[in-house]
Amino acid sequence: MVENGAFKMENSGRRVTLITGASSGIGAELARIFAQNNHDLALVARTTARLDQLADEISATGRPRPLVLTCDLAKPDAADQVLAALASAGASVEILVNNAGFGFSGEAATLDRGAQVASVDVNVRALTDLTLACLPQLLAVRGKILNVASTAAFLPGPGLAVYYATKAFVLSFSEAMTQELRGKGVQVTALCPGPTQTEFQTRAHFDPNMLLSKMSMMSARSVAQIGYDALMAGRRVVVAGMANRVLAFATRFSPHAILLPIIAWMQGMRRDNA
């Protein structure tokens, strides 16, 4: 229950790690890693069948079967739906993992407007709303938050303009929350993967001939392990992979006038449109 803005635990019940976008990719691997480290889980995604399959896989190892919460995070009331489902199951959040996110490749002016706005709803609004909704519970147990950003957060991204902008928000929001929650016992970590072997490229409609599609990619498992380790170690920001760390560092000191046409070219845009 909520009293005067603070979550009061009359009955601690089931304390879970809530993972969004858990049906595949980094989210599914994070679920496996958290489970292996004896965390009880609640899994959120749009696809019930995939979540059930993952929950069955985890329970088959002898660990508690994760709660399965089917929810479209693009909906305005998604956070309320998730918290209500947890409450009805007698569960509260001790670790929040905001992993869900997607984007679309191409020039923003040519892509479907509704689809692009939906990506903002998931990548930004839902992440923010769910974080704020869970904060009373997290403060009560001195919990943790892992936000999955991206190396895209460090620079503008012509060819994936909306996606890059949303990930810049995630990184900025995460770092600010780290400072605000300092001393209150809640740890916030931003995980910034580079190109990763997931379904993101397919959903984003990447051209297989574009340079980004041909780049060496990290496995979702290795990225998830880096994120888990960083969260447990209390790190503020972690960039997955040495090459990505070098890239993220270099972009901080490179003029955007030089970077923008390079990024546009890497993402398959003609240089005269960059």
Image (spheres, rainbow, N blue to C red):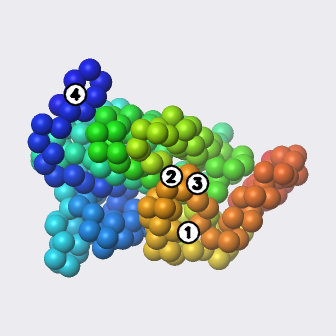
Instruction: Tell me how far mark 1 sits from mark 4, CA to CA.
Output: 39 Å
Circle 4: element type = strand
Q: Amino acid at mark 4?
A: Val
Task: Please say if the residues under marks 3 and 2 sit with CB atoms less than 8 Å apart.
Answer: yes
Judging by the rendered image, the residue that carries numbered circle 2 is 189
Task: Say few, some or many: other residues with alpha carbon within 10 Å of mark 3 (under 14 / 14 to 19 / 20 or more).
Answer: many
Going from N to C along the chain, the mark reached first, 1 or 2, is 2
Q: Amino acid at mark 1?
A: Thr
Q: Is residue 54 above or below residue 43?
A: below
Judging by the rendered image, the residue that carries numbered circle 3 is 237
Instruction: Tell me how far mark 3 sits from mark 1, CA to CA.
Output: 18 Å
Going from N to C along the chain, the mark reached first, 3 or 2, is 2
Task: Say few, some or many: other residues with alpha carbon within 10 Å of mark 4 (under 14 / 14 to 19 / 20 or more).
Answer: few
Instruction: Tell me how far mark 3 sits from mark 2, CA to CA.
Output: 6 Å
Task: Please say if the residues under marks 4 and 2 sit with CB atoms less than 8 Å apart.
Answer: no
Q: Residue at x 18, y 72 (%)?
A: 63
Instruction: Tell me how far mark 3 sits from mark 4, CA to CA.
Output: 31 Å
Viewer-side label of 1, 2: 2
In this view of the protein, which residue sits in the foreground, 138 or 118? Answer: 138
Going from N to C along the chain, the mark reached first, 1 or 4, is 4
Q: Amino acid at mark 2?
A: Thr
Q: Quadrant of residue 215?
A: bottom right
Task: Say few, some or many: other residues with alpha carbon within 10 Å of mark 1 (under 14 / 14 to 19 / 20 or more).
Answer: many
Q: Residue at x 87, y 48 (%)?
A: 255
Q: Is residue 192 left or right of residue 251?
A: left
Judging by the rendered image, the residue that carries numbered circle 4 is 2
Residue 264 visible to an observer of this rendering:
yes
Judging by the rendered image, the residue that carries numbered circle 1 is 196
